[in-house]
Amino acid sequence: MITPTSLLYPDAFLSPLAIDEAVHRALDEDLGRAGDITSLATIPEATKAQAILVARQSGVIAGLPLALATLQKLSPDIEVRPHVRDAARVARGQHVLTISGPARAILTAERTALNFVGRLSGVATLTADYVARTEGTRMRICCTRKTTPGLRALEKYAVRCGGGFNHRFGLDDAILIKDNHIAVAGGIRPVLERARTHAGHLVKIEIEVDTLAQLREVLDTGMADAVLLDNMDLATLREAVRINEGRLKLEASGGITLDSIAAIAATGVDYASSGALTHSAPNFDCALDIEA
């Protein structure tokens, strides 16, 4: 039997608990108190159907485990034959899943399943476009915490499907000192001293800087692991790489777009983070077609 985890991209983890929670929440939102009254009213209970989940554009697929879990939640009698798994690149018109079983369950699951695949494939496809423009450089493209509330684990998984990398997942897995932290704490050295005192031996510390003078101050302290270079132009990024001399990991951030990512990668920074990967990814066009 095909299970949701068997369709996961093998190089990116997504907890089965996160899948179950997302599917339960989405179906609860859609089914409400009375269920799918349209299908109940128009489709006899014993009716069987076969459907194809088809890509209507080219791109990178993600979210198939969510689609499968949605279908299986509504009926254990649904059978699914996958033609690809997550992170596969597909062409327009390509069949992604073949689904057969109780017609009511398939029709009820349709929109929720397509919402998951459309949203996550959109993130994966946009990420793949960014990654393609950095080919030949050492830079890694990363997502941020600018995710849809409640869907962060799913969207960050989709970034991995597209060949990107994850920044921190939340406020609890790394220390990222922003400009407001620096202002409240009284400066770069005081804020880094407090952070270093508090941090466990496995916790990394990154600090945001706006100028090369601030970068030099961070380097002089010797207390950071990485520096976020905020909204710096290309010339300043290149100079930051020169000043750093490979001592700390450098991350470019702020206003990064598909048009600018190649030039940013060429400066020599180690990472670039873009909220656009998740907050501005267009929906991937896919459909569920009932076969006659």
Image: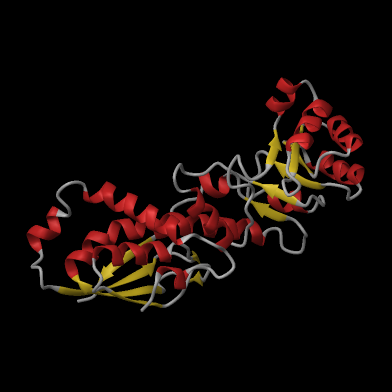
- Residue 260 visible in the shown view: no
- Colour scheme of the picture: secondary structure
Q: Nearer the viewer, residue 124 or 65?
A: 65
Q: Position of residue 221 (x, y in %)?
A: 89, 34
| Vertical placement of residue 194 versus 152, above or below | above
- Residue 273 visible in the shown view: yes
Q: Position of residue 161 (x, y in %)?
A: 55, 63
Q: Nearer the viewer, residue 146 or 19?
A: 19
Q: Is 243 positioned to the left or the right of 194 in the image?
A: right
Q: Is 101 positioned to the left or the right of 177 in the image?
A: left
User: Which residue is painted at 77% across and 52% down in the image?
Assistant: 270
Q: Identify the image quadrant of the N terminus.
A: bottom left
Q: Quadrant of residue 99?
A: bottom left
Q: Identify the image quadrant of the C terminus.
A: bottom left
Give the total of numbered labels: 0
Q: Nearer the viewer, residue 226 or 210?
A: 226
Q: Quadrant of residue 111?
A: bottom left
User: Which residue is painted at 55% across and 53% down in the image?
Assistant: 156
Q: Is 239 positioned to the left or the right of 263 in the image?
A: right
User: Which residue is painted at 81% across and 40% down in the image?
Assistant: 224
| Vertical placement of residue 272 versus 111, above or below | above
Q: Position of residue 215 (x, y in %)?
A: 85, 35
Q: Position of residue 33 (x, y in %)?
A: 17, 46
